Amino acid sequence: MSEQFDRHDDTILEVIGVTMTVLTALVAFLAVRADDKSADLDIEAQRALSEADVQEARADSQVVEQLRVYDEWVVAEPGSFAREYYESALDPLLWEDVIGTPVGVIPDDPFDDEFYDEVYADADIAFDEANALFDEAAVEGNRALEYQAALLTFAVGLSFAAWGSLAASRTRQRTRRMFTILALVALAIGGVQLLTV
């Protein structure tokens, strides 16, 4: 009778060991894949952020240039070549506000929110894209961490199953059953962790 229980315990431990080995390998693969995806998204986000920085630098340069041209236009002699030259160099958004201004009258500041919104539109879009990619990378990174937690649980359960199989003599039946129960608990916890990822 005792030999039959030993074989039954051996079978349970073998099934637990095989199951946990397969699950450990699967979860390790899933964790690596999620971590790789997170790294790829992070690299793509860094690229998008660099592009956003370039777009912002271009916009800054355009604003500075338009401020310079506008200042030159304001101080240029009405009807002079310089005034016409600077008028032709003004941004069309600024030109709409300036064109009807009588000679000698300085128009209201044409550098309004509409001007800045248009100048910085490409940079804003690029920053939004970079932030979205960083968010996706964070989600994948968290998924990888959740897989790694399940991996740790399965590895601990696998070690419990291994220790249980080492306790083969009759004097160690309690120890063997304790490790079997711990391995089953680890299998259940790891399964729940895996299913919630």
Image (tube, rainbow, N blue to C red):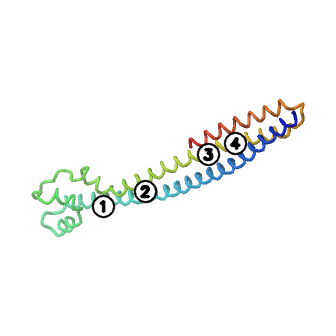
* Labels 3, 2: front one: 3
Which SS class for mark 4? Answer: helix
Of the numbered discs 3 and 4, the one sitting upstream in the chain is 3
Q: Is residue 51 left or right of residue 93?
A: right
CA separation in Å, label 4 and label 2: 44 Å
Residue hosting label 2 = 53
CA separation in Å, label 4 and label 1: 63 Å
Instruction: Estimate how packed mark 3 is, as few (under 14), some (14 to 19) or many (20 or more) residues with alpha carbons within 10 Å.
Output: many
Of the numbered discs 3 and 2, the one sitting upstream in the chain is 2
| Quarter in which the C terminus is drawn | top right
The percent position of residue 16, horizontal first and vertical second, equals 74, 42
Instruction: Estimate how packed mark 1 is, as few (under 14), some (14 to 19) or many (20 or more) residues with alpha carbons within 10 Å.
Output: some
Q: Is residue 72 left or right of residue 38?
A: left
The percent position of residue 70, horizontal first and vertical second, equals 23, 59
Q: Are marks 2 and 1 in contact (CB under 8 Å)?
A: no
Which kind of residue does numbered mark 3 sit on? Tyr
Work out whether 131 lies above or below 4: below
Please identify the quarter of the rendering in which residue 84 is found: bottom left
Q: Residue at x 73, y 37 (%)?
A: 183
Which kind of residue does numbered mark 4 sit on? Phe
Which residue is situated farthest in the front direction here?
1
CA separation in Å, label 2 and label 1: 18 Å
Which kind of residue does numbered mark 1 sit on? Glu
Which residue is situated farthest in the bottom direction here?
81
Residue hosting label 1 = 65
For the residue pair 76 and 102, the one nearer the viewer reads as 102
CA separation in Å, label 3 and label 4: 10 Å
Residue hosting label 4 = 154
Work out whether 61 lies above or below 149: below
Q: Are marks 4 and 1 in contact (CB under 8 Å)?
A: no
